[in-house]
Amino acid sequence: MSEVRDLQVPSGREPLSAVLRGPGELTLERRPRAPLRPWEVRIRVGLVGVCGTDRALLSGALATRYPLVPGHEFVGEVIEVGDPRDAAWLGRRVCADINNTCLSRRRAAPCRACRLALPHHCQRRDVTGIHEAAGAFAEELVAPAANLFAVPDSVSDLRAMFCEPLAAALAAFERAPVGPGDVVVVLGAGRLGALIAAVARRRGADVLAVGRSPRKLARCLALDCGELVRVDDPALSLRARVDARTEGLGADVVVEATGAPEGLLRAQELVRPRGTIVLKTTCGLPSGFDLTRAVVDEVTLVGSRCGAFADALELLARDPLPVESLVEETYPLREVARALERAGEVFKVAVRVGPDA
């Protein structure tokens, strides 16, 4: 591991934030509290997960507008409300949908997407920690009250931190439902892929979770992700494993979660005619993708992004799914640069925020 120099913590009393000023330009800054608008609440951040999106923002691989406070997989406590009608949220542990929309801002004239009940595609949205809205690598953040979801008392902060990625995993099967008898391949059994495989297994599907790193695949064991397969396993090819389950037809659903363009080529090799490829990574179209074959085989390509927080919290409350076992390292906010680097080397990293961190 290369040596990471910790960021300097500035003096002052304002809340501390990790601010991305440009690709590779991360600083710790104290930012004054802005007055809340009537539809907003202020949240004291407790715990934040580091994901591939955060690292892509840091490297510049994912474009955004700077400056930006990244971080979107979080749990915290509401400490202030902009409207007395939202006072019931005060003191409650919450997660928050990261899409800030016409509906969550209580606009009198919402955009067409919001009127069509497609708020995650709001034409005026910004996205907490990703696009034009400050995120959770900070002691405090501001979010719409309408985006809040109360964390059940039975769900620890560490479990609640997985609400956003688990919601995204559940969303993979909203438009490509799976159940008993279906064969599902998850390409990229990393942070998100492991959760997707675990969700498919809990719906009764026969799942192959595919990855490159034996160490990271071993982390998937506790989640019961199905059969764990190294993509370069010389013993038996991935296609042969799928054929053995499907009489040579191919997988019913293939989820592409590798983060690499080549993953879509492999997905096309594995999916059956009239099967579905679910795209969970924004890696672009690889050269060599056979559009003619996609038409002849009548394959459905489904883009999948954010999911329902309420469903994710309900699953975390009722199912002993041991998501906590995925976290290998935890760092305080002042070591956020180290946390972001380590997230490229270990399975899952968390950032603990607050005076005791």
Image (cartoon, rainbow, N blue to C red):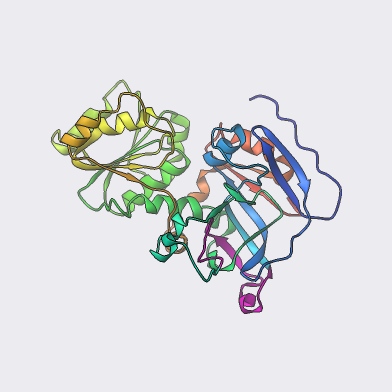
Q: How many marks?
A: 0
Residue 174 seen from this side? yes
Q: Position of residue 35 (x, y in %)?
A: 73, 65
Furthest residue in direction top, as rendered: 234
Q: Is residue 202 above or below residue 103?
A: above
Q: Nearer the viewer, residue 167 or 246?
A: 167
Q: Which residues are magenta?
A: 80-105
Is 281 one of the magenta-colored residues?
no
Furthest residue in direction right, as rendered: 11
Residue name at image x 54 percent, y 64 percent: 147
Residue name at image x 45 percent, y 43 percent: 192
Toward which corner of the image does residue 95 lie, by quadrant? bottom right
Residue 250 seen from this side? no
Q: Is the N terminus in the top left, top right, bottom left or bottom right quadrant? A: top right
Q: Is residue 39 above or below residue 6?
A: below
Q: Position of residue 102 (x, y in %)?
A: 52, 63
Toward which corner of the image does residue 9 lie, by quadrant? top right
Q: Nearer the viewer, residue 112 or 203?
A: 112
Q: Is residue 60 above or below residue 40?
A: above
Furthest residue in direction bottom, as rendered: 85
Q: Position of residue 60 (x, y in %)?
A: 59, 33
Q: Nearer the viewer, residue 250 or 296?
A: 296
Is 101 one of the magenta-colored residues?
yes
Residue name at image x 66 percent, y 24 percent: 2
Residue 150 in the figure: left or right of residue 286: right
Furthest residue in direction left, as rendered: 247
Residue 32 in the figure: left or right of residue 149: right
